[in-house]
């Protein structure tokens, strides 16, 4: 019998427990910078060196980080389910934990791409992209990241995956970042849904949703037990 399709949508709360903070967290790398200065295409064109340095720092943090129990359990669920991970995170911790089907909505920090041709994407074997490192078409390599104001090219693929979910889980996201937060509206009303996040949300309008009010690492075992009932 075919395994049920389990779609897991993850956000910053999963990676935060591996020590990776976002711009919303106090004390993080983002506090030293304005978003407009490091995470927009205008910033890239006006101060390329600053943007490269910022993402080089972030990349070093990702390389030093390790997958946590939430990443590992999500990977373990592949034994029983056809697991598709859709993530807002740009790190590679899901892959390093063993997840095979991972769709990154906001790009991947461990890849570089051409500024001139979005289809030219290169895996990185080192921490830095340097000024003067060029793609095969002669343009500066940039981080393979979706910056604020840019299109999210993988959204259509994410909608298709979500529409086919037999079970749908959200882990570690405030559901405030659009268009990704709109994924829930593509899940069938009859599909069982879970949210693992310690925050308070007005979710009365979502049918068949169970809210586990814990962090990703602390709530993942309870989630696993409930998913096992739906094999």
Image: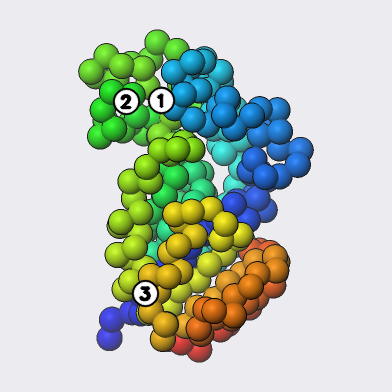
Q: Badges 1 and 2: C-beta atoms under 8 Å apart?
A: yes
Is 161 above or below relative to 31? below
Identify the image's colour scheme: rainbow, by chain, secondary structure or one colour.
rainbow
Count neighbours of disc 3 (C-alpha within 10 A) and say few if under 14, some if 14 to 19, many if 20 or more: many
x then y, percent, for residue 200: 70, 69
x then y, percent, for residue 165: 36, 74
Any mark on residue 114, and which?
2
Q: Badges 2 and 3: C-beta atoms under 8 Å apart?
A: no
Is 14 above or below relative to 74? above
Chain-order first, disc 1 or disc 2: 2
Q: CA distance from mark 1 to mark 3?
A: 34 Å
Count neighbours of disc 2 (C-alpha within 10 A) and say few if under 14, some if 14 to 19, many if 20 or more: many
Is 63 above or below relative to 96? above
Specify whether residue 68 is in view. no
Q: Residue at 44% x, 45% y: name it.
A: 106
Chain-order first, disc 1 or disc 3: 1
Nearest the camera: 54 or 77? 54
Q: Badges 1 and 3: C-beta atoms under 8 Å apart?
A: no
Residue receiving disc 1? 142
Which quadrant does the N terminus fall into?
A: bottom left
Determine the image quadrant of residue 222: bottom right
Residue receiving disc 3? 165
Q: CA distance from mark 2 to mark 3?
A: 34 Å
Tell which residue pokes out farthest to the right in this image. Answer: 27
x then y, percent, for residue 78: 41, 69
Viewed as shown, does residue 120 lie left or right of 83? left
Specify whether residue 41 is in view. yes
Any mark on residue 219, and which?
none
Local secondary structure at mark 1: strand
Determine the image quadrant of residue 114: top left
Q: CA distance from mark 1 to mark 2?
A: 6 Å
Q: Residue at 50% x, 89% y: name it.
A: 229
């Amino acid at each position: 019998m075919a395994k049920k399709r389990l779609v897991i949508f993850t956000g910053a709360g999963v990676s935060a427990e591996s020590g990776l903070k976002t711009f919303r967290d106090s004390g993080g790398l983002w506090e030293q910078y304005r978003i407009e200065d490091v995470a927009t295409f205008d910033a890239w064109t006006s101060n390329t060196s600053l943007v490269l340095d910022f993402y080089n720092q972030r990349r070093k943090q990702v390389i030093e980080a390790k997958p946590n129990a939430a990443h590992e359990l999500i990977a373990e669920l592949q034994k029983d389910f056809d697991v598709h991970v859709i993530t807002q995170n740009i790190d590679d911790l899901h892959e390093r934990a063993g997840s095979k089907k991972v769709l990154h909505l906001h790009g991947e920090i461990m890849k570089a791409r051409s500024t001139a041709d979005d289809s030219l994407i290169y895996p990185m074997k080192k921490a830095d992209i340097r000024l003067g490192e060029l793609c095969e078409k002669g343009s500066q390599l940039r981080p393979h990241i979706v910056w604020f104001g840019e299109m999210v090219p993988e959204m259509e693929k994410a909608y298709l995956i979500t529409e086919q979910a037999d079970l749908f889980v959200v882990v570690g996201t405030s559901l405030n970042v659009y268009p990704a937060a709109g994924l829930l509206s593509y899940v069938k009303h009859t599909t069982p849904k879970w949210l693992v996040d310690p925050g308070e949300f007005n979710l009365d309008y979502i049918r068949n949703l169970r809210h586990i009010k814990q962090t990703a690492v602390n709530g993942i075992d309870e989630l696993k037990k409930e998913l096992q009932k739906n094999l």
